[in-house]
Image (cartoon, rainbow, N blue to C red):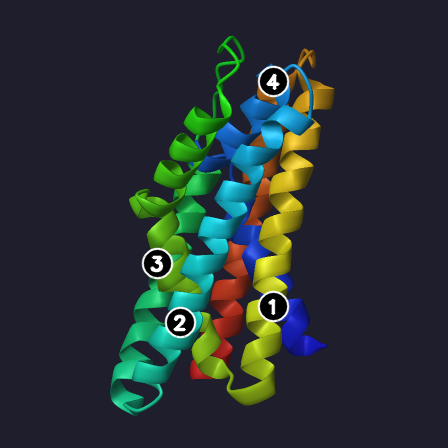
Amino acid sequence: MDVILHGIILAFGLILPLGVQNVFIFTQGATQHTRRKAIPAVVTAAACDTLLILIAIFGLSFILLQHETLRTVVMSVGIFFLLYMAYSIWHATPSMNMNEEALSTKKQIMFAASVSILNPHALLDIVGVIGTSALAYDGTKLFLFATACIIVSWIWFFALMLAGSYLKTLRHAQTVLVRINKCSALFIVGMALYLAIGLF
């Protein structure tokens, strides 16, 4: 349960800030005429995240577990990266354009894939944070950690799309987004401390 909880909290903390990827999914929920028409964007983003998570956890973990010194160095960098990211998220001012026209299925898939795989911030989050956090586990625990992260990703994107469809007329959307980022920053600081305690 500790491993699953760690995966859930870490993945949720990383995916919570409304960056390019999340804003796109949210706006698809808000701009598509029906929720069903926004599903291609959701599935594409979640599938891309799943692929990146698997590569980061099993590929990076396999390599670094063979070298204890390299593992320590990478985890230390990951901790500092978490703290830097928490600082950036805390001071970020999210914004979104709700006046976009509804995109076709093909354009949704292409855009969702690009903001998921080609987004440096998303790559650093998944490879640099989730991948290094996975170094604390092996065997069944590693599998549970990966599964927890992937499930959170899928649930989050679907929930975000639904939120967009419900909250498209919310007057104080900007304030809500700022508060979401503050909560995310606190989550990430907690994960940095958790990793530091385990490392040192």
Asked if disc 4 and disc 3 are in contact, CB closer than 8 Å, the reply is: no
Disc with the residue nearer the chain's start (4 vs 3): 4
Figure quadrant of residue 187: bottom right
Give the label, 1 or 2, closer to the camera.
1
Secondary structure category for the residue under label 3: helix
Q: How would you rate the neighbour count of disc 3 (Cα within 10 Å): few for under 14, some for 14-19, many for 20 or more?
A: some
The amino acid pointed to by label 2 is Thr
The residue at which mark 3 appears reads as 81
Residue ID for mark 1:
147
Q: Residues within 10 Å of mark 4 (few under 14, many from 20)?
A: many
Q: Secondary structure at mark 4?
A: loop
| View extreme (front): residue | 106
Q: Quadrant of residue 170?
A: top right
Q: Name which residue lies at 69% across and 25% down.
A: 35
Q: Nearer the viewer, residue 21 or 47?
A: 47
Badge 1 or badge 2: first in the primary sequence: 2
- Residues at discs 2 and 4 in contact (Cβ within 8 Å): no
Closer to the chain start, of discs 2 and 4, is 4
Q: Is residue 195 left or right of residue 43?
A: left
Q: Secondary structure at mark 1?
A: helix
Compared with residue 96, is residue 153 higher up or lower down, i.e. above or below?
below
Question: What is the distance, in whole Å, between disc 1 and disc 4 at their CAs?
Answer: 30 Å
- Say which quadrant the C terminus sits in: bottom left
Does residue 143 appear in this view?
yes
Q: Real-space Cα distance between discs 4 and 3?
A: 36 Å
Residue type of the residue flagged with mark 4: Gln
The answer to which of 88 and 158 lies nearer the viewer is 158
Which residue carries the number 4 mark?
A: 32
Q: The N terminus is located in which quarter?
A: bottom right
Q: Give the image location of residue 32, x and y in percent.
A: 60, 18
